[in-house]
Amino acid sequence: MAALGDPAAATRAPGDEEGGARSGADLTLEHVTKEFGAFTAVDDLELTIPSGSFFALLGPSGCGKTTTLRMVAGLEHPTSGRVLIGGRDVTRTRAHERPVNTVFQSYALFPHLSVVENVAFGLRRRRAPDPLGKARDALELVELPHLADRRPAQLSGGQQQRVALARAIVNNPAVLLLDEPLGALDLKLRRQMQVELKRIQTEVGLTFVHVTHDQEEAMTMADTVAVMNAGRIEQMGSPAELYELPRTAFVANFLGQSNLLRGTVVENGAATLGVDVDGRRVRVPTARSVSTTGTVLVGVRPEKLHLLRAGDQAPESCNVLGPGRVTDVSFSGVSTQYQVHVPGLGTLGVFVQNILGGAGAALGEEVHLACAIKHTFALDGAEDATSGAVRLDARDV
Amino acid sequence: MSIVAALGHGPGNGPAPAPVRRARGGAYLLLAPGLAYLGLFFVVPVVALLATSLYVPVPGGDVGQFQPAFEWANYTRALATYWPQMVRSFAYALIATLAALVIAYPMAYVIAVRARGRVFLQGMLLVLVIAPFFTSFILRTVAWKQILADESFVVAAMRAVSLLPPDGRLTATSFAVVAGLTYNFLPFMTLPIYASLERLDPRLVEAGADLYANGPTTFWRVTLPLSMPGVVSGTLLTFIPASGDYVNSVLLGNNTTTMIGQVVDSRFFKVSDYPTAAALSVVLMVAILLLVTAYVRRSGTEELL
Ligand SMILES: Nc1ncnc2c1ncn2[C@@H]1O[C@H](COP(=O)(O)OP(=O)(O)O)[C@@H](O)[C@H]1O
Ligand SMILES: [Mg+2]
């Protein structure tokens, strides 16, 4: 506790993390439900966030992310369930009694206080020694020491964002909550702040819970991502796990893009399933299948598909689909995105890396599609194949 | 106007773009009626007032006959005679302002913060605050005379709980005058405070709670400072008219509660001593101006106003 509210201490002694308090605390939500009248905003949430991790809560607008954070902060109380911080049940305690700080979506800086007084606010409330010195250290950490005596209204959006971050971090909370902290920044600044936030988290070693609707942001920053939809957690894991092996159609579509094909399991082997997709036999590893009987959705990521032009040989242990016709080609330098219409299956997206150079398949050309068996996955066939799909033009990145 | 523009831009910068100049001309044109009104009904009377305050009686003339002079002694004489009423006016106004603040702030807080989001309730409560304006100021003050009369239940109740001795009374006391002032200016205190609390972002209060401040501390450190613009305008809107008021002390007071407004009134209408009345008015005006300037400076809310 000696280093309380002193982020600079972490910089001086990065190896000294046995202190416990230094690296934040575990956050656990047990069966947390929040209802507003008849509407369930958060539905039976079950979540454990290990101390010191960078955790992202990812989901579309209105799925209950802010409500979840507010329940952790104590600004909202769950209808049922428990919130534990470092093993201690804080469900019944109020916001000011919790060792948690929030970086609000709107920053919520106090307009009547100078920047340094904003940062010192929490320290003063807890009667920490030398609040102004620590506040200045925190401003150093977010690279704004020269603006300490300004008023928040005199700062740019990006600077206000950093002050809000310093104001929260300086208290050395057990859990730091960030509610779409980069949402109001322009794209360039957002990318820069992503790197910055990651650096600061590594430096101070606190538990960060970062809420965002931007899947790229969640994947680049977080150790663990929880994908949330309509008040529930759909799936949780490392970004690579979620991407390579989505367990629901929502995750498959919301995190990157997926081609999902409806089929019926006709052969239930120990290693692979045989799935009949519109009369074609497709193999899926049993371990990568959510459901092993009846209807399933066979999924494959666009960059895992290979375009086979006339005369090309299909690689080993591959599923081959087609023939289909190229209906759209968009070249972006690094890669080319094709839309291939396969009769009976619909339109599939294919990303081809520009490794060989030169022209690829042409518009209207007849092609086959191949995909390694180990890269396919299967979801519950009862799901809506378009759940969570974002129209490309609606994505704000 | 064109001279100012020419000076402002200097010879080297060439003429200002025509549209800008036309827009400014238009703005001044829009201001013209207001300026003319103020000139006619404010500047001219103030100059007349200043002049009158220095007049001397016409030698051998009738009562109420004066001639222009520079009789500065009018001021010293008026102040030497009437300083107690002057001091009393400011004291009453100050107490009434503080009392109104104590009553109005919680009221405004309930309407703006507690009833936030309940539009109908807020509207109803605001109508109740403004309702007194629907009847005349004089009539309401006369009504207070009834409320505070010796045989009223207020007096009976206060005697019952020994807040007032058995033979104590409220009418014709300084308490009644201050109570009347407080009551009459209460809406002027409530509405500006309501407006600034209504504007207050509730997320700032949540940020306070998030940063370890409990309810009272958040109020003290966040809500109150951010509502200071409303408090400052409310206190000014109450203090200024209250210190010049004479209706309340006439109707609810006695000859020991005389306020400066009453003196000006009687000097002017009863004994036709225009220079003294004018001198007292000028002193009142200047004193208020100085007090208000010092107050606004001290409260440091210029940037929030
Ligand atoms: N105080 C409230 N009263 C009623 N409904 C609310 C309240 N707060 C949030 N909601 C509803 O709960 C849902 C989830 O909101 P929120 O947690 O803010 O979503 P997100 O942050 O993921 O965009 C939304 O549909 C929203 O309308
Ligand atoms: Mg939100």
Image (spheres, rainbow, N blue to C red):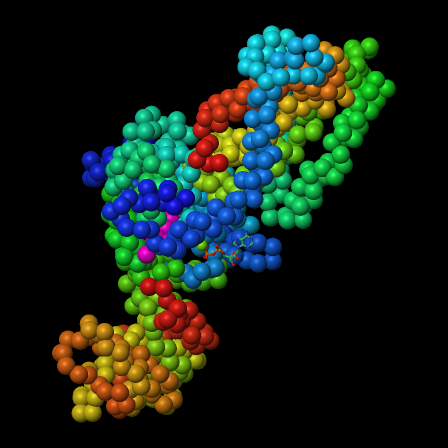
The answer to whether residue A96 is visible is no
x, y percent for residue B172 = 77, 16
Horizontal side of residue B296 vs B257, given as left or right:
left
**Residue at 82%, 24% in the rendered image:** B146
Q: Name, please, the residue furthest toward the front.
A: B60
**Residue B283 is inside the magenta segment:** no
Quadrant in which the C terminus of chain A is drawn: bottom left
> A38 or A382: which is nearer to us?
A38
Q: Name, please, the residue furthest toward the right.
A: B151
Q: Which residues are magenta?
A: A177-186
Quadrant in which the N terminus of chain A is drawn: top left
Q: Main secondary structure of the magenta part?
A: loop
Where is residue A169, by image quadrant? top left
Horizontal side of residue B124 vs A261, given as left or right:
right
The answer to whether residue A77 is visible is yes
Where is residue B85, by image quadrant? top right
x, y percent for residue A278 = 38, 88
x, y percent for residue A351 = 25, 76
B143 above or below A23? above
x, y percent for residue A230 = 48, 62
**Residue at 24%, 47% in the rendered image:** B12
**Residue A178 is inside the magenta segment:** yes
**Residue at 56%, 35% in the rendered image:** B39
**Residue at 37%, 42% in the rendered image:** B4
Q: How many marks?
A: 0
Ligand 2, by image quadrant, is bottom left
